[in-house]
Amino acid sequence: MSESVAPSIPLPECPALLIIVSGPSGVGKDAALKRMRELNYPFHFLVTNTTRPQRPDETDDQDYHFISKEQFAAMEARGEFLERAVVYGYDYGNSKQEVRAALARGQDVIMRIDVQGAATIKRLVPDAVFIFLMPPSIESLEARLRKRRTEPEEYLKIRLHAARLEMNEVEKFDYVIVNEDDALDETAELMYAIIQAEKRRVRPRCVQI
């Protein structure tokens, strides 16, 4: 009696992914991705250009590229941005060429943007992976924003109102992670697990930019 042989099933190719990490202001997007870099996850972490003033705990060209409005306008005129948005009066833009170059190297790209920017990317690059970071509660989010001490009270109220509206957009994302207080390692591990699962899809995503 001959032994049965399992059919040869070709494994799907694992092209590089574009991972969008979004969520309301203060949810911990920057902190989570900073922790992923510290843990040496093998991704290209896209650095956003912004006209927002640099905060005391931020490093230029690592947390953001802090540039002037004139520099931003010149980059926009040259068509350098994959996505750009105005958030609380400041400009934010992400380099199209930097994303293309990393993907061409076969490197997964992680891009953190606000909910408005994520909607733009969803239209432009529907095969990107969209992850929404959610706070444990609106009270926790308020505490995080107050801990920053970077905005006056009237701006804080605007951010909290916007956060409530942004959290209603969660159903437009592929995944949601509750970024618990003092649990950045767990959040980083969950994002890594999502990316690894995406790599094993029977029908891989094909990112085209």
Image (cartoon, rainbow, N blue to C red):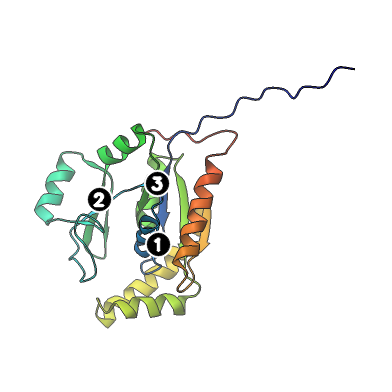
Residue 113 located left or right of residue 205: left
Find residue 103 and report its image quarter: top left
SS of the residue under disc 3: loop
Q: Residue at x 36, y 50 (%)?
A: 111
Q: Residue furthest top?
A: 2
Hey, which quadrant is residue 100 in on the image? top left
On the picture, is 101 further left or further right than 75? right
For the C terminus, the quadrant is top left
Q: Where is residue 141? Give x, y as percent.
A: 42, 75
Q: Amino acid at mark 1?
A: Ala
Q: Position of residue 190 (x, y in %)?
A: 52, 57
Quadrant in the rendering for residue 65? bottom left
Question: Which residue is tagged 1?
Answer: 32
Give the mark, 1 or 3, whose residue is nearer the N terminus: 1
Which dot marks residue 42?
Answer: 3
Q: Which residue is mark 2?
A: 93
Mark 2 lies on a secondary structure that is strand
